[in-house]
Image (cartoon, rainbow, N blue to C red):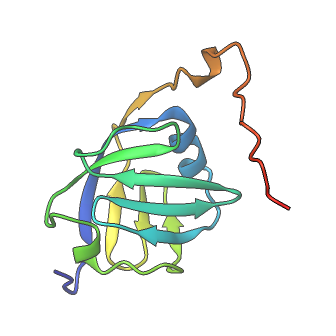
């Protein structure tokens, strides 16, 4: 569905961590593209832009795609650069995410008192 003008997506809700990363982003690039998610590399972090059909995560932004049913239809490509502006972020030349008025939510992951235990995997000699 690409045309001469980039598609516009309104960010509806985002984690406070994702908003902070995006608003302070100096540079970054599209990491990976799926039907309902675009992952963007910002510094050492990955921020996920998702459609309303996905669950929120600590580094995610839920968006309303207005002219497209999926991110793949927009033909975003891994490696395309992002451009951060005061109230929006452009993903390549195909999509502009409007961040103005985005509802922020704080993840409860910091409330977990015990560390996450990762089981050891037995290796056969």
Q: Position of residue 64 (x, y in %)?
A: 22, 50
Q: Residue at x 29, y 58 (%)?
A: 36
Q: Residue 94, relative to residue 35: is it above or below?
A: below
When asked about the image quadrant of residue 94, the answer is bottom left
Q: Position of residue 35 (x, y in %)?
A: 28, 65
Q: Is residue 22 visible?
A: yes
Image quarter (top left, top right, bottom left or bottom right) of the C terminus: bottom right
Q: Position of residue 87 (x, y in %)?
A: 42, 51
Q: Position of residue 29 (x, y in %)?
A: 55, 71
Q: Residue at x 42, y 67 (%)?
A: 90
Q: Is residue 6 visible?
A: no
The answer to whether 103 appears left or right of 57 in the picture is left
The answer to whether 46 appears left or right of 53 in the picture is right
Q: Residue at x 19, y 85 (%)?
A: 3
| Residue 32 or residue 94, whichever sits in front | 32
Q: Residue at x 43, y 77 (%)?
A: 92
Q: Residue 27, relative to residue 86: is it above or below?
A: below
When asked about the image quadrant of residue 8, the answer is bottom left
Q: Residue furthest front?
A: 125
| Residue 62 or residue 22, whichever sits in front | 62
| Residue 53 or residue 91, whichever sits in front | 53
């Amino acid at each position: 569905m690409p045309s001469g003008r980039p598609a516009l997506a309104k960010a509806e809700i985002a984690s406070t961590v994702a908003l902070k990363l995006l608003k302070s982003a100096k540079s970054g690039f599209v990491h990976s593209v799926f039907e309902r998610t675009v992952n963007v590399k910002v510094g050492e972090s990955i921020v996920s832009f998702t459609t309303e059909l996905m669950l929120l995560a600590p580094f995610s932004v839920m968006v309303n795609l207005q002219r497209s049913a999926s991110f793949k239809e927009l033909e975003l490509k891994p490696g395309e650069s992002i451009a951060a502006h005061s109230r929006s972020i452009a993903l390549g030349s195909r999509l502009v995410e409007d961040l103005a008025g985005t509802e922020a939510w704080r993840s409860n992951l910091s409330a977990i008192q015990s560390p996450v235990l990762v089981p050891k995997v037995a290796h056969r000699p």
